[in-house]
Amino acid sequence: MCDARRVKRERIVPVESGNVPDLVELARVVAQQRAELDRLREQAATSAVVERAKGVVIALTGCSADTAAETLLQHAKAARRTLLEECWITLGDLASVRSGDGTSPERDDRPEGTEDVLPAAGLRAAASTPDDVADALGRLGRALVHVDTHQHLAACLLDHLGPDLDADSVMIYARRPGGGLELLGHAGVDERLAAQWRHVPPFSGVAVLDALEAGEPRWLEDFAEDSARYLLIGDPPERWLSRAWLPLSAGDDSDLCIGVLRGRAGSFTPRDRAHLLGAVRLCAGRLRTLTAAPEPVPDASSDAVQALFAALPVPAMLLTPLRDASGAPEDFRVDAATPQVTGLLDGTGGDPAGRRLREVWPGLTDAPVWQGCLDTLAGGETYESEPFAHQETVDGVAELTTYSVRVTRLEDALVVTWVRHASSDRQEQRLAELQRLGSLGWANWNLATGEVSWSAQVFEILSRDPADGPVPLYGLSALALSDDRSAWTVPSSPWPATVSRSTSRSASGARAACGICGSSPKWWPTGGARRSRPTASCRT
C-alpha cells in the first residue's frame, strides 16, 4: 500500500515571454517544493518502521500483509495510540514475545488469530494515560524515526523530557555477557564523566544493575537514602538529586536500561512515571533496531601477547587506538598489561586488559602523557615523560618512588612502559625540583683550567640561552646591575678569597642575586706532593 501523493508542479511564467517573474511567487513555489520533499522524507522513514512492524506480525502469526496492517491499526485504536507508536511498541516487545515457545503459528489469514500472539500488556495502562502525556508520546514516536545512533537517541530523549519533567541528563546502558555495563549513549553528561562510567564492573550497589536484575524501574527520589544504598553517578553525585533507571522490558531478559537524571530533588509524580514508562517503551523499539557495535574479532595471537606481557619484569601495557567517526583517536583499549601496572594506575583496580585506557587511568587526559601517546601514534617518535613521584608500599612501608613513562609505537599500537629510577636519580630529581621551585642555581669556575659549569636553573634565572654556554668569571660583571658593578671583584690570584654580592636582572625583569662568589683551594696528592686547584663557585 503506497500513500505517496502526486507532487503538484506550479506553473512559472517564462522570462522570454516579456513578463518579469514575481519573486514572491517564486519563493512560494520553492517553499512548497521543499515542504513536499520534507513530507516525502518523513513518510519514507515512517513507512520503514510500519513495514518492519508488519513483518514482525507476519512472522509471529503467519498472516498476510493486509491483515498485519489491520491488526496493528486495531491495536493502536484500542490503546488510544498512533499507528507509529504501536509499531514502535511491537518492535520493542518482540524480544519478550520470542521468549515464549519460540514458534510461529501456521498462516490462517485471520485477524483474530493475532490477538493471542501480539503483546497487549499495555492496553489498560495506556487507556489511563493523561491526554497531554499521550500527545507528548505521539511527538516522541515521530521524532524516533530520524534517530540512527544511541547518542542521537539520548539527545532526542533529553529534548523530549527536559521541558516537561525537568530532566537534565539521559544515559543509556547495556548489560554485557560478563555482567558488566557499557554506556551506549548519553546527553547532558560531560565527556570526562562519561569516560569514567563508560564501563561499570558487575559490582553490587549500582542502581542500573539493580534495575536490570529486578526487571523493574528504580526511582531514586531521596538523595540521602539513595547515596547510602547505591554508588551514585556524578562528580559530585549531588549534581543529580533525583534519578530514574528504567529497564526496557520486564523480566529477567532485560539487557538495556535508560536513566533519566534530574538536578532538582523531589519524587516522580504518577503522571511523570506514566510519561517515563511510555517513553522508554517507545525507545525500546528504536533500540532494538539500532545496529549493534561490532564485537572485536579475537586474534589468534592475543593469548601469546598477553602471556608475553605477563612475564615481563617491568610495568608495561599494549594499547590499540579507538577512533571516532572522523578517524581521530578518542581512547585506547588495553590489549595486554603486566601485573605491576595495576598499582600505578588510578582507576577502579583489577586487571586493565580489555578495558579502555581512560577508564583505568581517569586523569590521563589532563596529563602530558595523553598528548605524548597521541603524538607518538601520529608521528612515531618515542615519547618519554618527566620523572614523577609515585607512592607505593614496599614490605608494608609506604615510600615515594620516582618513575617516568615511555611510549613507543608498534605498527598501529603503542607500548607504554614505566621506568623506575634509582635512589640517586631520585635525589637528582629532588634537587632539580628544589632549584626550580626556589629559583636557585649553582655555577663553578675552575680558575686554573678555565672550565665553567652552570646548572640548568642558572641559565633560566639569567635568561641566557644554554646554546651560548656559561659566562666566564671575568664576564659576570656584565650581568650585574649598574649600581653593583663597582662592588664586583674577580679574584686576581689563584685563591685569595673574595666575597662579594651582586644583583642582575633577567630578560623577564626578575632580579637575580649572586649570594656568594669566591675561590678556595682544593688539594689532592700528586707524585707525593700536595698541590692545589683553585676554583670559584656561585649560588644564585
Image (cartoon, rainbow, N blue to C red):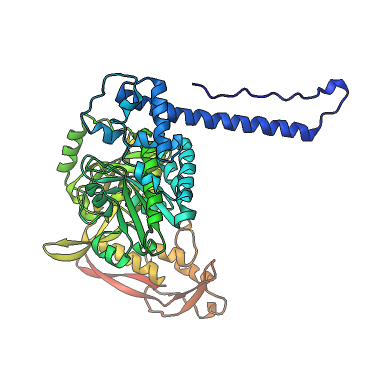
Give the answer, above or below, for where 284 lies relative to 102: below
Residue visible at 30% across and 50% down in the picture? 359
**Which residue appears farthest toward the left when viewing the image?**
395
Q: Quadrant of residue 284?
A: top left
Residue 132 percent across, percent down from the top left: 48, 50
Residue visible at 16% across and 38% down in the picture? 307
Residue 170 percent across, percent down from the top left: 40, 50
Residue visible at 19% across and 41% down in the picture? 309
Residue 262 percent across, percent down from the top left: 40, 58
Quadrant in which the C terminus is drawn = bottom left
Q: Does residue 299 show up?
A: yes
Q: Does residue 368 show up?
A: no
Give the answer, above or below, for where 3 lies relative to 165: above
Q: Nearer the viewer, residue 284 or 455?
A: 284
Report the number of numbered marks: 0
Residue 454 percent across, percent down from the top left: 40, 64
